[in-house]
Amino acid sequence: MGDCHYLYGNYMTIKRITFLQELLTFLGLEGRIHLAWISSAEAQKFVQVVTDFTEKVRALGPNPLPTFSHNKKAALSSVLGRGMGKTPGSSPPEPALQEVYP
């Protein structure tokens, strides 16, 4: 830790990955994110880490959230906060340019 030449990059990365792991666990998607420190000189290690993680995700199977499986657009809209109280797939009309820039 602390070897990142951008000073705090690896600390911030661990913080973000930990948050994402907790969020994915809450959503029922645990085990679908992985972090490994690999140098650019460690090609074999990179190949092994990617191969192992790919096998792990394949073993977990498809996304278990039924909303995402059946209607991806509606699920994405709800995650982004755009689909609340609206028909899936519908979006508010774009404001006229004059309304945005009077």
Image: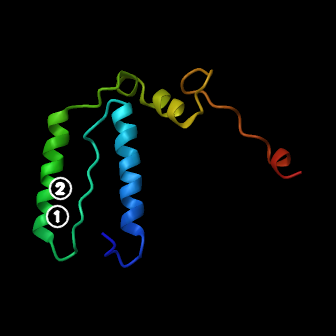
Q: Could you say which quadrant of the image residue 90 lies in? A: top right
Tell me the residue at 17%/47% (across/down).
54
> To which residue does mark 1 refer?
46
Residue 92: percent from left, percent from top? 68, 32
Residue 20, relative to residue 92: is it above or below? below
> To which residue does mark 2 refer?
50
Task: Determine whether the residue tagged by mark 2 lies in a helix, strand or loop.
Answer: helix
Task: Determine whether the residue tagged by mark 1 lies in a helix, strand or loop.
Answer: helix
Relative placement, left or right, of 90 versus 102 is left
Screen quadrant of the N terminus: bottom left
- The residue nearer to you, when weighing 98 against 59, is 59
Tell me the residue at 62%/21% (across/down).
85
Residue 93, relative to residue 48: is it above or below? above
Residue 102, relative to residue 79: is it above or below? below
Q: Could you say which quadrant of the image residue 69 lies in? A: top left
Relative placement, left or right, of 58 versus 7 is left
- The residue nearer to you, when weighing 23 against 75, is 23
Q: Residues within 10 Å of mark 2 (few under 14, many from 20)?
A: few
CB-based contact (under 8 Å), mark 1 and mark 2: yes
Q: Which label number is shown at residue 29?
A: none
Residue 51: percent from left, percent from top? 13, 53
Q: Amino acid at mark 1?
A: Phe
Residue 87: percent from left, percent from top? 59, 20
Q: Could you say which quadrant of the image residue 27 lies in? A: top left
Q: Residues within 10 Å of mark 1 (few under 14, many from 20)?
A: some
Q: How many marks?
A: 2
The answer for how far apart the CA atoms under marks 1 and 2 are is 6 Å
Residue 68: percent from left, percent from top? 38, 28
Relative placement, left or right, of 95 versus 58 is right
- The residue nearer to you, when weighing 26 against 63, is 26
Q: Amino acid at mark 2?
A: Val
Tell me the residue at 71%/39% (across/down).
94
